[in-house]
Image: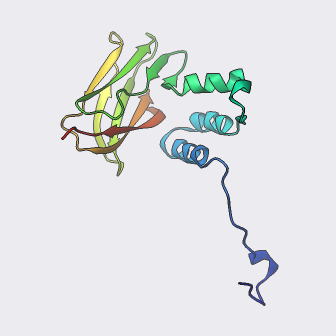
């Protein structure tokens, strides 16, 4: 349908997104973490993945390995929550250097309300979260280092019936 007296500026073209998940990851990072994570996400979303699997570059393989971790730096390494989806409990593996003062994992419900907060103790290397008391549904878990939010991911809780 064409309108006869519509200015040329108002002609719209349909938008097609080549990688909608990359766009979702960018905005999720923008909303839930600090600016340092946004810059690193912007770089990874612009990587070109070739259709031929045999021609995978080392950069793409290192990105895949980095996605197995929630956060990695010279002071701390934190794995993703597993098992995901969780039923009875969920665990996180981590290592902390002695010079890091404060690290904690915060769990939010889908509406953004804080459900629980778990400090990451330097002498331990594993955190176990009891999910029995949580309702079945989607949750977000976020890593905060010295008061700054550095990474956020999703966790699904699904109880067996």
* Residue at screen point 50% across, 16% down: 75
Coloring applied to the structure? rainbow
Q: On the rendered image, what quadrant is the N terminus found in?
A: bottom right
Single out the residue that lies furthest toward the right.
Answer: 8
Q: On the rendered image, what quadrant is the C terminus found in?
A: top left
Left/right placement of residue 53 relative to residue 87 reads right
Single out the residue that lies furthest toward the bottom.
Answer: 4
Report whether residue 160 is seen. Answer: yes
Label total for image: 0
User: Where on the picture, by quarter, is residue 126?
Assistant: top left
- Residue 132 location (% of width, % of height): 19, 34
Query: Where 53 falls versus 10 (above or below)?
Result: above
- Residue 81 location (% of width, % of height): 38, 28
Report whether residue 121 is seen. Answer: no
* Residue at screen point 39% across, 22% down: 102
- Residue 143 location (% of width, % of height): 42, 30
User: Where on the picture, by quarter, is residue 41?
Assistant: top right
* Residue at screen point 79% across, 82% down: 7
Query: Where 15 falls versus 42 (above or below)?
Result: below
Left/right placement of residue 63 relative to residue 78 reads right
Left/right placement of residue 132 relative to residue 72 reads left
- Residue 111 location (% of width, % of height): 35, 52
């Amino acid at each position: 349908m064409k309108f006869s007296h519509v200015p040329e500026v108002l002609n719209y073209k349909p938008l097609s997104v080549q990688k909608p998940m990359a766009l979702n990851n960018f905005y999720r990072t923008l909303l839930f973490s600090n600016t340092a994570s946004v810059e690193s996400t912007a770089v990874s979303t612009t990587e070109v993945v070739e259709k031929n699997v045999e021609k995978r570059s080392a950069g793409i393989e290192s990105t895949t390995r980095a996605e197995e971790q929630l956060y990695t730096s010279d002071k701390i390494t934190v794995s993703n929550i597993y098992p995901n989806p969780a039923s009875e409990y969920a665990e996180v593996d981590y290592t902390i250097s002695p010079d890091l003062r404060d690290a904690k994992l915060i769990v939010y419900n889908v509406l953004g309300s804080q459900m629980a907060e778990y400090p990451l103790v330097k002498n331990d290397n594993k955190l176990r979260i009891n999910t029995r008391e949580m309702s079945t549904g989607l949750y977000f878990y976020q890593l905060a280092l010295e008061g700054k939010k550095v990474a956020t991911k999703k966790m699904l809780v699904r109880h067996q019936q």
